[in-house]
Amino acid sequence: MTQAAEQPATHFEVVVVGGGMVGAALAALLGQAGVAVALLDARPEPLAADEVGKGLPAMRVSALTPVSQRLLEGLGAWPWMAARRVTPYRFMQVWDSEGSGEVNFSAEQAGVPRLGHIVENDVILAALERRLAELPTVSMQLGMRVTGLHESPVGREVVLEDGRRLSAPLVVACDGAHSPLREMAEIAVKAHDTGHVAVVTTVRTERGHGDVARQVFLETGPLAFLPLTVGGDERYCSIVWSTSPEEAERLTTLSREALGHELQAAFEARLGAVEVVDRALAVPLSQRHAEHYVQSGFALVGDAAHSIHPLAGQGVNLGLMDAAVLAEELLAARRRGIALGAPRMLERYSRCRRGDNAAMLALMDGFRLLFGTRHPLVTLTRNLGLSGVDRLTPIKRLLMRQAIGERGRLPASCR
C-alpha cells in the first residue's frame, strides 16, 4: 500500500476505477439510484458517439446474452445501441473439423426470441457513457491514472497521478485483466497461459450469415464466425480465430486476400468465399482468476477478477453480472444504513460471483483441452458427444439456458 499524500481528499460513496463496459455499467447502476460515484479512467476523452457504429464494424465485439440485454435495457442504454448497430443471432452451429460431430442450437429450443446479440464493444461503451452523462451523482473523470491505494478513516483512498486523492467507503477495481489496483491491494491471482493467441478481424462472406453464430474446432483451436449486419447486409462476420502463437504470427502477416483463402478453407467454405475487409490483430490469451474478490472497502469486478478464454463469448457477460450483483448488494446495504465497504456485505457478493465464474472458467478450459487434442479416441468421443447432444433436446435446452445467462438467482436488474 502507498502512503497518503498530505492534502484533503474528495469524498464519494463509491470510487470505480476503470471506465470500460463493466465499470461504466456499475457506475450507471449506482448512479441511477442516486449514489455519489466517481468513475476514473486513464482514457483522455469519451468515445465520439456520433462516429460509433458507422462504417466498418470495430474488430472488438461481444456476444451479449439476453440477460445482459435486460441489464442494458434497464440502464436505458439498449435503445441507442439498437438504433446504432446490434446483430441478433437465433441459431448456433458448432462442429469438429476432425470428424462428423456437430451440434445446432436455436432460440426456439431455448424458449427465447433470440440467443443473443453480437455488438461492437464501442457501441456498448458509447451508450453507457451517454447514460452516465445524464446522471447527476456520477462524476466521470477521464485522463486519470491511479498511482496509489490505501486505507483511510472512511474506508479507502486512491491517489491520482496529479497528487489528488479521492476517498470512499468502497473502491472498486474494474481496471482490466492486468489490474494495477489488484496489485496495489496485494491480491494474488492464479493465471495460466492457454497456449492460444486470438486472431481477430472482420470479413465479408459470399453468403449471408442467416442470424447464425458459427464455430468450428480446428486442430490448433476454435474459429468463430460471429454474425454482423452492416446497413442491412448480412454478409459480414467478426472473426475470432484462437490458434497457436506461431500460427497467429503467420496469419497476421498474410495479405488480406491470402488470409481470406485460409479462413474459407478452415471454415469449410460454409459461407462461400471470404473477403477480409480490415486488418488482422493478434491478441494473446491467458486465463486468470483472483484468489479473493474483496477486502474491507475494496472489490474486484470484471476482468480484474477473472479473464476467460473467448471460446463462448462469455467474458463481458460475466463482468456485467458481477456489476449487477455488486450493485444490488450495495443498494440493499445503503437502504439499511450499512457501510458500503462492510466486509460481510462484500463477502455476499464474492460468494455469489466467485463460484459461478470459477465454474465457467473451468468449463471453458475443459472445452479448450478436449478439443485441443488429436488423439483418435478423444476425437471419436467428442464427435459422438456433439452428435449425442444434438439429438437430446433436454440436454441441449440445459446448455442453452447456461449460454444465455440464465444461471441461478439473477439480480433484479437482470430479470
Image (cartoon, helix red, strand yellow):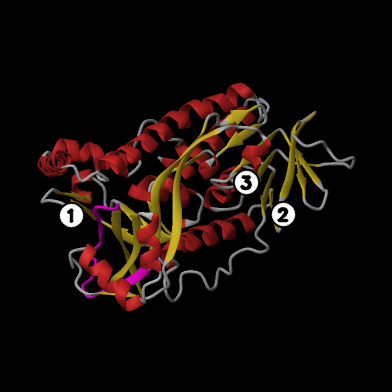
Dot 3: what SS?
helix
Q: Which mark is residue 31?
A: 3
Q: Is residue 251 magenta?
A: no
Query: Which quadrant of the figure contains the C terminus?
Result: top left
User: Pointer 3: residues within 10 angstroms few (<14), some, or many (20+)?
Assistant: many
Dot 1: what SS?
loop
Q: Residue at x 45, y 46 (%)?
A: 286
Above or below for 106 versus 406: below
Q: Residue at x 27, y 69 (%)?
A: 262
Estimate the x, y position of residue 356 in percent, counting from the top left: 41, 32
Q: Residue at x 64, y 52 (%)?
A: 135
Query: Please, what is the three-letter code of the amino acid marked with disc 3?
Result: Gly
Dot 1 or dot 3: first in sequence order is 3
Can see residue 400? Answer: yes
Q: Which residue is mark 2?
A: 144
- Residue extending farthest to the top is 344
Q: Which residue is mark 1?
A: 97
